[in-house]
Image (tube, helix red, strand yellow):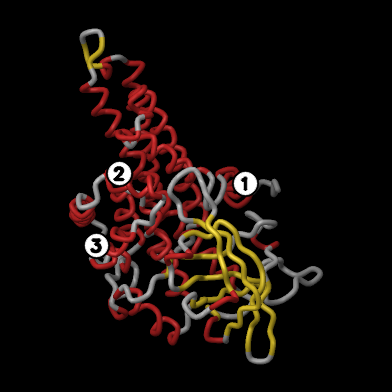
């Protein structure tokens, strides 16, 4: 796999040229209508970008997480929002590493061709939050079927997905047992689920299509199980590492967008006879944000490289997400401050990106939980929660 600078720079140019077909006005219009970026997703699929991580034998590009991160980064750097794309990328890791040969053969070629969409990953619940081992959605074994019942919340893109990964408890927790045991991962066909599953969109502060999903006795066959029953939590962790790295890449893209916007504005905006960027009070916060974003980018590449090599990368993936989310938010503040009133004007797009990038500090995991993870697993300190 070619991770050379020339290879990645070529990839960046290709994505930037592609994103030129979807200028910032496209994204502004979508937000005004609270609409899904259907044309963008279809074009990304047609170009093969959403099949980046699918191996060639299944019709994909066979790229690594390094390249996938660059793709998403450049979407955000161009002023877009890659949230409509990233799930289909990081779910590939779960299917590739843990799906049966039959499951991969039945799903991956169709995903690569765009005949199926896998954009939804249902884990979070109203009463469990970040404590995944406390989920109450149950998959009860009845004869040769599982019967799925429960409720999930903040599950994105359900309405625009054909398939959904769902984590449910298939065995009751026993005394003294590992709390992560007994959780099973299912691949649910949303097209055939019928009235046994329904969802309702949750309005949020920007144009994100996220939902509350209810399962009401949905029957699932053994063919829907990903990997081994009861071991789903371990598979989800693989997905989490990929997700954190890809979201870090998006945050890096946002950070670079803000730095470039702020630098250009500060260099051209003239007040009191000179560009405002000549004032250290304006220039220094932008320059510091640039340094923070570049540092976060290096950690992102380090984590992605470990993932692509099949090595442990939990701490690195979490640090990449932590550093990149903080850097993008800080860069957004610097851009908004430098641009003053124009930063709040919708036509300049910074306020939209400012709202979008805040999510990275909170989801898919709070930065405080990342610090708790690092304190315990990287530094060996006592568990803090």
Question: How far from the left and from the top, in percent, is residue 375?
Answer: 61, 45
The circle drawn on residue 2 is 3
Category of crowding for the residue at label 1, using alpha-carbon neighbours closer than 10 angstroms: few (below 14), some (14–19), many (at least 20): some
- Farthest residue, direction front: 33
Q: Is residue 35 above or below residue 184?
A: above
Question: How far from the left and from the top, in percent, is residue 92?
Answer: 41, 69
Q: Which residue is mark 2?
A: 79
In this orientation, does residue 5 appear?
Answer: no
Q: CA distance from mark 2 to mark 1?
A: 32 Å
SS under mark 2: loop
SS under mark 3: loop
SS under mark 1: helix
- Disc tally is 3
Residue visible at 35% across and 30% down in the picture: 345
- Farthest residue, direction top: 272
Quick check: marks 3 and 2 in contact, CB under 8 Å? Answer: no
Residue visible at 44% across and 39% down in the picture: 355
Mark whose residue sits in front, 3 or 2: 2
Q: Which residue is mark 1?
A: 372
Question: How far from the left and from the top, in percent, is residue 15?
Answer: 23, 54
Quick check: marks 2 and 1 in contact, CB under 8 Å? Answer: no
Category of crowding for the residue at label 2, using alpha-carbon neighbours closer than 10 angstroms: few (below 14), some (14–19), many (at least 20): many
């Amino acid at each position: 796999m070619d991770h050379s600078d020339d290879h990645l720079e070529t990839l960046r140019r290709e994505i930037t040229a592609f994103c030129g077909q979807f200028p910032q006005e496209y994204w502004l219009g979508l937000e005004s209508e609270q609409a899904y970026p259907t044309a963008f997703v279809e074009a990304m699929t047609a170009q093969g970008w959403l099949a980046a991580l699918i191996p060639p034998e299944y019709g994909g590009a066979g790229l690594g997480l390094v390249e996938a991160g660059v793709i998403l980064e450049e979407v955000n750097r161009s002023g877009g929002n890659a949230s409509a794309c990233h799930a289909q990328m990081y779910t590939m890791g779960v299917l590739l590493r843990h799906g049966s040969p039959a499951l991969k053969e039945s799903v991956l070629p169709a995903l690569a061709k765009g005949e199926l969409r896998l954009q939804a990953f249902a884990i979070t619940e109203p009463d469990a939050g970040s404590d995944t081992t406390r989920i109450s959605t149950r998959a009860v074994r009845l004869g040769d079927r599982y019967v799925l019942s429960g409720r999930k919340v903040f599950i994105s893109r359900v309405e625009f997905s054909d398939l959904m990964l769902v984590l449910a408890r298939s065995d009751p927790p026993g005394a003294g047992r590992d709390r992560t045991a007994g959780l099973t991962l299912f691949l649910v066909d949303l097209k055939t689920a019928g009235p046994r599953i329904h969802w309702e969109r949750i309005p949020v502060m920007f144009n994100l299509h996220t939902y509350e999903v209810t399962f009401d006795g949905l029957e699932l066959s053994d063919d829907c199980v990903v990997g081994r029953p009861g071991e789903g939590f371990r598979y989800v962790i693989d997905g989490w590492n990929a997700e954190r790295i890809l979201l870090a890449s998006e945050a890096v893209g946002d950070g670079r967008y803000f730095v470039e916007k702020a630098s250009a504005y500060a260099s051209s905006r003239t007040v009191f006879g000179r560009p405002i960027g000549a004032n250290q009070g304006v220039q220094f916060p932008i320059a510091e944000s640039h340094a923070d974003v570049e540092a976060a980018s290096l950690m992102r590449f380090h984590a992605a490289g470990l993932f692509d090599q099949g090595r442990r990368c939990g701490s690195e993936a979490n640090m990449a997400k932590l550093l990149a989310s903080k850097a993008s938010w800080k860069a957004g503040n610097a851009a908004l401050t430098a641009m003053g009133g124009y930063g709040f004007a919708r036509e300049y797009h910074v306020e939209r990106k400012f709202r979008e990038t805040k999510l990275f500090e909170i989801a898919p995991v709070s930065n405080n939980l990342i610090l708790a993870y690092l304190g315990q697993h990287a530094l060996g300190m006592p568990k803090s929660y």
